[in-house]
Image: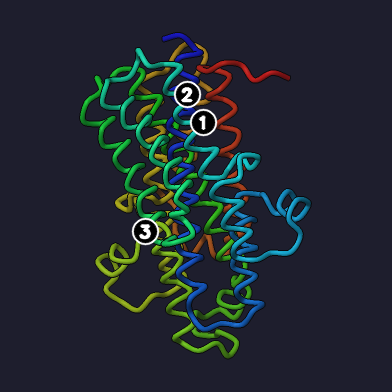
Amino acid sequence: MLSRTADHLFWMARYMERAENTARMLDVNYQTSLLPQSADAAENGWRGLLSISELTADYSERHGDITPKKVMDYMVSDERNPSSIYSCLMAARENARAVRGALTTEVWETQNQTWLEFQRMLRIRAFDKDPGDAFEWVKFRSHLSRGVTVGTMLQDEAFHFLRIGSFLERADNTARMLDVKFHAVESEFFGTGTANGNGGKDQEYDFYHWSAILRSVSGFEVYRKAYRNVIRPEKVAELLILRADMPRSLAACMDEVVSNLQRVANEQSHDTLRRAGRLQADLRFGRIDEILATGLHAFLSQFLERVGTLGVGISRDFLVPVAA
């Protein structure tokens, strides 16, 4: 396969996944903002959302103070924000258009229709009228895109590059979300040595806080089924890091990345596959008590660094070289 074709497929999938992840975080923040809370707590929630995408500095420079309306507009429809839903869906559609011949008709029409419908939703201000419903639409279109890909495409190299892009992006986002959300309360919940030493915060607040984290990755029902217990921070971390049967966990994402990398391996990709395999093994045989003992923030920071290096290796081995 031509490296340029692989590049378009890889980034088409990444941008579609990124649009969904952005919609998930915005939806959870919006729903949480409707709960009784202090102004500082509400602002910290929106600030954390910007931090996940490393957009705090850009937002502050252009918009100043943090308000729900400004952050929503910035993350939904701002053309100059590369991580906005607008930018992601446009980039996904443009990458799909560039390799139209490598896609089935159903995959192309799904991408194209998503972009056209999103523009219509912006015109009628659907994200202002009913944000929750609009974010559900974005998630549904991303699910549809992946489903149509699996259901209609030949499982050749094109298919595998789409999968690599999707799951590398998902791993990166899940780790960023965990890092920001847990780092904000790590000293509070883990520094005391117990999950109950919450510094005076009531159990109702704890429940909504951890429920929001789980709901952002469609993990609330999964948690209940897997643990059948009250929501505990260390179990949330275990579910979203080490449980390979949780679709959006780091372990599940790396299993998919390694599996698909093996199917497209070439003469120069040995080192990249080795790095991916080591990262997969660390997650497969890791234990949450060991991770928490050494520091969750340190673990996730290292994971993000390793995923970033892996992305560079994939670009070097398979895709269009990045200009220096």
Give me the disc on residue 95: 2
Against 88, residue 205 (above or below) is below
Q: CA distance from mark 2 to mark 1?
A: 6 Å
Residue type for callout 3: Asp
Mark 3 — residue?
133
Of 318 and 143, the residue lying toward us: 143
- Mark 2–mark 1 CB contact (< 8 Å): yes
Of 324 and 82, the residue lying toward us: 82
Q: Quadrant of the C terminus?
A: top right
Residue type for callout 2: Asn
Q: CA distance from mark 3 to mark 2?
A: 27 Å
Residue sitting at the far front: 124
**Percent of width and height locating residue 206:** 48, 80
Mark 1 — residue?
91
**Percent of width and height locating residue 66:** 69, 64
Against 100, residue 246 (above or below) is below
* 275 with respect to 148 (left or right): right
Q: Nearer the viewer, mark 1 or mark 3?
A: 3
Residue type for callout 1: Ala
Within 10 angstroms of label 2, few (less than 14), some, or many (20 or more) residues?
A: many
- Marks counted in the figure total 3
Q: Find residue 298 and report its image quarter.
A: bottom right
Identify the residue shown where x is 41% and y is 68%: 235
**Percent of width and height locating residue 139:** 37, 49
